[in-house]
């Protein structure tokens, strides 16, 4: 079986045995996802890139602890999520180093019509600011639903919470986000 | 609680339940029964209709945006830069092991060659011993302070 056809759990078993090509395959599979998940949480491209790489290093180091019966992605997500929390804690401690969201265009407009693009750019700027004003748990669920378009079951699986909690957390997060955006209008 | 207050409480609870269902409704995640129940409620609830509209608008705004990507050449070099970082990680592990071994070896020889050496004046032994003891106490104190600060971190709510 080629590495491309291997499922994640089998790749993890091979990584545990020291197979670098299995590690490379896993990285190719998840590098963009990892970067986007981190970007949504920390809102800074350089930090998100660094977190995505650090997450793979942790995967490599902890391959021995991975249980082959569990699904890889929720486990990997918890590593990324913890790294993002550490990053935000460090940033909060060094307030002078807080990022300027205006300079960190982590969300871009998909509009191509030049007449509409200016309005959309303004909306994107407001949305970026509003998202970064949310508490971490609200921001996390908004990013997973609105920008990764995951189902409630998938979010529940990743965050290890019941589906009903996903619905309620999403409701309060959306309400908060709509309130903040309303203040900018 | 008085009867009137209970009634108010249950009305609020029921209203809150529908508010939460609103998220499931907009994402098409409700069961057919829940959906029907919610739609009946929606007809008679102006507040929920208003909130539904604001959520739809929010979905429209976020739907017109995507994550900023990084240039293709950065992705191409991703594995090689990650590999270098992993290699460096292994180097640090060996450097740490070497440092621990050297520290243990050095401490042992200081103890044998210095403190157990009868030719070294007692006063010098006491002086050096006090210095080492002071450094150890200082290190423990700093470590304890760090741990204490971590436990009382005011940004602890960022942990799930």
Image: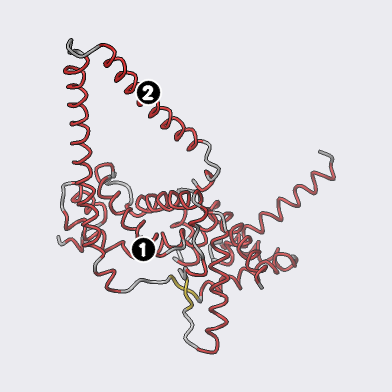
Instruction: Write the residue at 18% across / 36% down.
Output: B98
Above or below for A101 versus B106:
below
Task: For marks 2 and 1, give the one nearer the viewer.
Answer: 2
Residue at 18% x, 10% y is B118
Chain assignment, label 1: A
Quarter of the image with the C terminus of chain A is bottom right
Using residue A1 as the reference point, say whether residue B79 is left or right of it. Answer: right
Determine which residue is flagged by label 2.
Answer: B134
Q: Secondary structure at mark 1?
A: helix
Under circle 2, the secondary element is helix
- x and y percentages locating residue B17 in the rendered image: 66, 54
B113 and B17: which is toward the camera: B113
Distance, label 2 to label 1, CA atoms, is 50 Å
Residues tagged by mark 2 and mark 1 found on one chain of the structure? no
- Decide if residue B8 is on the left or right side of residue B130: right
Asked if residue A137 is positioned above or below residue B118 in the image, the reply reads: below
As displayed, is residue B3 above or below residue B103?
below
- Please indicate whether residue B11 sits to the left or right of residue A56 in the image: right
- Mark 2 belongs to chain: B
Query: In terms of depth relative to the viewer, which is nearer, A99 or A86?
Result: A99
Q: Residue A120 location, x and y as percent?
A: 55, 79
Q: x, y percentage for residue A147?
A: 47, 67
Residue drawn at point x = 35 percent, y = 25 percent: B136
Which of the pair B112/A2 is nearer the observer? Answer: B112
- For the point 26% across and 46% down, which residue is it? A61
Q: Find residue A33 and name its label.
A: 1
Residue B86 shows which numbered tag? none
Task: Tell me the crowding category of disc 2: few under 14, some 14 to 19, or many 20 or more residues within 10 angstroms, Cα based.
Answer: few
């Amino acid at each position: 079986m080629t590495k491309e056809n291997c499922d994640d759990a089998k790749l993890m078993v091979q990584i545990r045995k020291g197979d670098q090509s299995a590690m490379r395959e896993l990285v190719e599979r998840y590098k963009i996802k990892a970067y986007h998940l981190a970007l949504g949480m920390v809102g800074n491209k350089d930090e998100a890139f660094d977190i995505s790489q650090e997450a793979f290093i942790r995967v490599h180091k902890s391959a021995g602890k991975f249980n082959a019966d569990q699904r890889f992605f929720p486990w990997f997500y918890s590593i990324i999520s913890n790294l993002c929390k550490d990053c935000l804690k460090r940033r909060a401690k060094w307030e002078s180093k807080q990022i300027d969201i205006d300079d960190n265009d982590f969300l871009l407009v998909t509009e191509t019509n030049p007449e509409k693009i200016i309005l959309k750019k303004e909306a994107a700027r407001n949305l970026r600011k509003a998202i970064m004003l949310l508490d971490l748990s609200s921001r996390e669920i908004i990013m997973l639903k609105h920008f990764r378009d995951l189902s409630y079951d998938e979010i529940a699986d990743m965050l290890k919470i019941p589906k009903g909690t996903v619905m309620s957390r999403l409701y309060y997060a959306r309400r908060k986000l709509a309130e903040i955006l309303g203040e900018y209008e | 609680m008085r009867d009137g207050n209970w009634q108010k409480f249950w009305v609020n609870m029921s209203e809150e339940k529908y508010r939460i269902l609103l998220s499931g409704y907009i994402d098409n995640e409700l069961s057919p029964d829940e959906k029907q129940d919610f739609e009946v409620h929606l007809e008679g609830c102006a507040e929920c209709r208003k909130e539904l509209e604001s959520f739809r608008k929010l979905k429209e705004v976020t739907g017109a945006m995507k994550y900023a990507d990084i240039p293709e050449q950065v992705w191409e070099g991703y594995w090689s830069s990650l590999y270098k970082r992993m290699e460096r990680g292994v180097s640090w592990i060996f450097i740490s092991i070497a440092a621990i071994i050297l520290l243990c070896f050095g401490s042992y020889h200081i103890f044998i060659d210095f403190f157990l050496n009868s030719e070294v004046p007692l006063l010098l032994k006491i002086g050096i011993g006090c210095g080492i003891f002071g450094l150890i106490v200082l290190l423990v104190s700093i470590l304890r302070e760090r741990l204490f600060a971590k436990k009382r971190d005011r940004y602890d709510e960022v942990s799930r």
